[in-house]
Image (cartoon, rainbow, N blue to C red):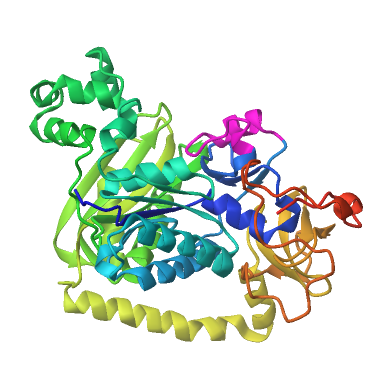
Amino acid sequence: MRPAPTILHLDMDAFYASAEQAAKPSLRGKPVVVGGIGPRGVVATASYEARVFGVRSAMPTAQARRLCPNAAYLSPRFTLYRQVSEAVMELLHELSPLVEPLSLDEAFVDLEAGGVPAETAAVRAVGEKLRRDIRSATGLTGSVGLAGAKMLAKIASEAAKPNGLVVIEPGTERELLGPMTVRTLPGVGPATAETLRRAGIHTVAETAEAGEAELVRLLGKAHGAGLYAMALGRDDRPVVAERDAKSISVEDTFEVDLTDRTRVRTEVLRLADRCVQRLRAAGRSGRTVVIKVRNYDFSTLTRSETLRGPTDDPGVIREAAVRLLEAVDTTGGVRLLGVGVSGLADFTQEDLFAQLATEREAEELAKAAPEAAGEGAEGGEAAEKRPRRWHPGLDVVHEEYGAGWVQGSGVGRVTVRFETPWSAPGRVRTFAVGDPALRPGEPLPLVGGRPEGARPEGAQSSEPAILPKSLSPEPPASAEGSESASGEEMSSR
């Protein structure tokens, strides 16, 4: 344990939903839910406005719609989220060489390794400046926790939400942790919590009082001893700059159970190709191919096959995935399929002829494509770029109206709201799904993307309205009639 709170934990506030609110002026201050939008989708992130209604991450989207039917339900735009995440991580690396990303929106930082004085006032100043810099660079807010250990820094950032900063002074850990539920401690999931509950242990203080011997008896040596140390506020885990991924995988949940064996095989092949794309993007190869099958009754099984050496060859991984599928009974219906690769390495040991055959096949396909296109190449290319479905939240561009996003689609029509991060709430128009003037677009930058002087007078800021009421400034008296031409109320910043 450190004598000063020099470990920082940053957690962006309702990251995906806040990014969508920043990109879409008409959604600021309103409930937004990002995730799978189908009947079997799952909520990835809910804005604070949606959480008031009980919507939470990992909740089925169908349940979220019942709780908050008036929310905007949007498909994720990971291209945008990665862009924002890269900007945030750059700011963190300016503070210290030891940055441990946990996800796109969360990371630990060792401020001591960055030369920050081991004093509360100094680390607090760094944390406050980081929050200001993130707001300036991305238009979004993040919560910061500072403590002498990783576990405590994460607890502090959770207590700081939204858009706050909390410092846990060394020496106050046990007093702070005592009344908290045992689920607060890392590694305590539903199963462990239930085991402790049956033993009469509900809080962190009761966990510490139980003693190490009792926890080892209940949970095993490693888990019990580790949990006892954390209940006392002890956590000596270092901030690790490089976290090595153990596996890479992709999976899909289907709106209707798959019963056709040929369709199941086709989906496994498609997932295998996506998995290889992610594998190659990470510059890795893998030795073990894994498939995951969730049946109609929610029973889930996995099958794996270990190859003779690491590979990133799509043909090899596809063949292994199909072989594994042949040993699985899917006649009752398949709800979810997944393909993954583990045993990762930075090199491959593939058969030379297999590699040459793959490269030759790719070259032949590349040569054949322009010949097959013929005179209608331009029209065919546009058709390929057109999505099969216009998902809510998708970026689009119209030849006449410019940039916008899909509000919804159905019965051959697509509804688009035309607005940008730096504009006022925009107008809504409806088009035929095959309108040649409408095409998919790229995410616009949340900050700094507007040409100088292009922001309309009275337009909203790109900052999402996620501040708690206690921190939100009161609107000026002169803003009484500040409504947009479309009659939508402008949310206070």
Is residue 375 something that shows in the picture? yes
Q: How far from the left and from the top, in percent, is residue 395?
A: 66, 63
Q: Is residue 241 magenta?
A: no
Residue 214, image quadrant = top left
Is residue 327 something that shows in the picture? no
Q: Residue at x 84, y 74 (%)?
A: 400
The correct choice, above or below, for 186 with respect to 321 in the image is above
Q: Nearer the viewer, residue 91 or 40?
A: 91
Q: Which residues are magenta?
A: 50-69
Q: How far from the left and from the top, in percent, is residue 330?
A: 37, 36
Q: How far from the left and from the top, in percent, is residue 431?
A: 82, 59
Q: Is residue 475 left or right of residue 243?
A: right
Residue 233, image quadrant = top left
Q: Residue at x 48, y 64 (%)?
A: 129
Q: Nearer the viewer, residue 328 or 188?
A: 188
Number of marks drawn: 0
Q: How far from the left and from the top, in percent, is residue 268?
A: 38, 51
The correct choice, above or below, for 347 with respect to 181 in the image is below
- Please identify the quadrant where the C terminus is shown: bottom right
Q: Nearer the viewer, residue 378 or 66?
A: 66
The correct choice, above or below, for 164 with respect to 184 in the image is below
Q: Residue at x 16, y 74 (%)?
A: 351
Q: Is residue 66 magenta?
A: yes
Q: Is residue 153 left or right of residue 431?
A: left
Residue 63, image quadrant = top right
